[in-house]
Image: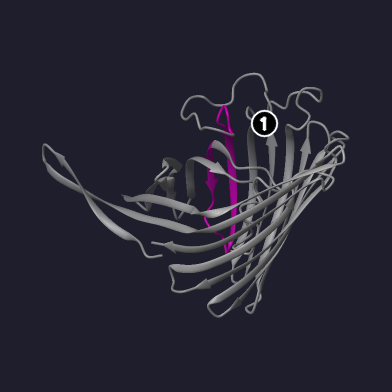
């Protein structure tokens, strides 16, 4: 994944100045087949779809500047869809960092649930919008301390863009107003992480404002604890994570366990995920589960053949099951 450098010339009255921008990207294309079966009032319905297409088409621009005195600025702009169908904006971040005091980051991103993002490259990616919640937009500020023998501490504050499901509103909108589901909630959190040698682990606590009421906003968040760890045993990797979220009414508990087995150029992986609602209401209380199996064959450092299969329940009670199979060629640059 070595980067391509371009020089951008900016003309000014005093002459030309130059800045270097790093361009990276990822493209994955191939075949997808999906099935869905649901049961309502004892009647089952099913749907199937399959075909060729683009799975991933991302482009990233990163600019970095040495500000002197050990201070550095990094800006990242991205496009998360670059296809014939159009070009869609992606995540944006600006980070000021110094080896002596850490890093301060401002971000506007479309992010996944804690466990949907995966556990130290072991498993979990791909369950957003399936077992776990779909990705949502937010604007955030965070601080990460320098590493002390592998340990770091973080502080963060995030505001969901007014409609976190469909669009990011950008600067100045925030989350003011009457609670209307999770779209209006802001969060503040503290976390700690360790990454050294074969072990990677983290844990944290987050609290939310604008919680609403049990009658109108029962699934709004009150607070959450989360933790995950992954260990590289050399011949294989294992990882697991949990998130315990207190809702305005009831609780929501997520869990994920995954493993990866490298066999030369071939890597096999497996993941199991679950989400459990308790004391929210009779219709939603219960557990959703899913599992995934995958294989990746590296043709080079930047090109791979990928095959994966996922099976999950969309709702509690096993009355809405779905599967997805992907056969892809992936390339990064």
Q: Which residue is painted at 55% across and 37% down in the image? A: 137
Q: Which residue is painted at 51% across and 32% down in the image? A: 168
Quadrant of residue 12 within the rendered picture:
top left
Q: Quadrant of the N terminus?
A: bottom left
Q: Give the residues in magenta.
A: 139-164
Spot the residue most to the left.
14
Question: Where in the figure is residue 21, as x and y percent of width and height?
Answer: 30, 52
Here the colouring is: one colour
Question: Where in the figure is residue 122, as x and y percent of width and height?
Answer: 63, 64
- Judged left or right of residue 242, residue 30 is left
- Judged left or right of residue 227, residue 98 is left
Q: Quadrant of the C terminus?
A: bottom left
Mark 1, secondary structure of its residue: loop
Whether 186 is drawn above or below 119: the answer is above
Spot the residue most to the top.
178
- Judged left or right of residue 18, residue 209 is right
Nearest to the observer: residue 1 or residue 84? 84
Question: Where in the figure is residue 151, as x and y percent of width and height?
Answer: 60, 59
Nearest to the observer: residue 107 or residue 295? 295
Q: Which residue is painted at 52% across and 32% down in the image? A: 167
Nearest to the observer: residue 21 or residue 146? 21
Quadrant of residue 87 within the rendered picture:
top left
Nearest to the observer: residue 44 or residue 163? 44
- Judged left or right of residue 124, residue 92 is left
Q: Is residue 68 visible?
A: no
* Residue that carries the numbered disc 1 in the rendered image: 182
Residue 97 in magenta stretch: no
Crowd class of label 1 (few under 14; some 14 to 19; many from 20; radius 10 Å): many
């Amino acid at each position: 994944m070595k980067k391509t450098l371009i020089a951008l010339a900016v003309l000014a009255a005093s002459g030309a100045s130059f800045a270097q921008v790093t361009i990276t990207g990822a493209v994955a294309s191939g075949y997808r087949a999906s099935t869905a079966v649901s049961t309502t009032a004892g009647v089952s319905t099913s749907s199937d779809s399959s075909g060729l297409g683009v799975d991933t088409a991302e482009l990233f621009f990163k600019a970095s500047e040495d500000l002197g005195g050990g201070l550095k600025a990094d800006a990242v702009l991205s496009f998360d869809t670059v296809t014939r169908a159009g070009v869609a904006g992606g995540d944006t971040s600006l980070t000021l960092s110094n080896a002596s005091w850490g890093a301060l980051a401002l971000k506007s991103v479309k992010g996944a649930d804690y466990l949907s993002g995966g556990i130290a490259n072991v498993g979990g990616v791909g369950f957003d919008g399936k077992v776990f919640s779909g990705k949502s937009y937010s604007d955030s500020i965070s601080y990460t301390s320098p590493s002390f023998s592998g340990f770091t501490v973080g502080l963060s504050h995030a505001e969901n863009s007014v409609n976190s499901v469909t669009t990011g509103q950008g600067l100045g909108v925030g989350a003011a107003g009457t609670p209307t589901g999770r779209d209006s909630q802001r969060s503040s959190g503290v976390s700690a992480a360790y990454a050294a040698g074969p072990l990677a682990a983290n844990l944290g606590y987050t609290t939310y404002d604008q919680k609403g009421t049990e009658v109108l906003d029962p699934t709004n968040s009150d607070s959450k604890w989360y933790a995950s760890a992954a260990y590289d045993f050399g011949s294989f990797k294992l990882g697991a994570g949990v998130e315990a979220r207190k809702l305005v009414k009831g609780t929501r508990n997520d869990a994920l366990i995954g493993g990866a087995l490298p066999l030369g150029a071939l890597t096999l992986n497996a993941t199991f995920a679950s989400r459990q609602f308790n004391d929210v209401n009779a219709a939603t209380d219960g557990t959703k589960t899913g599992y995934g199996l995958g294989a990746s064959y590296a043709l080079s450092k930047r090109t791979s053949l990928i095959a994966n299969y996922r099976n999950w329940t969309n709702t509690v009670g096993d009355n809405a099951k779905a599967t997805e199979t992907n056969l892809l060629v992936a390339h990064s640059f």
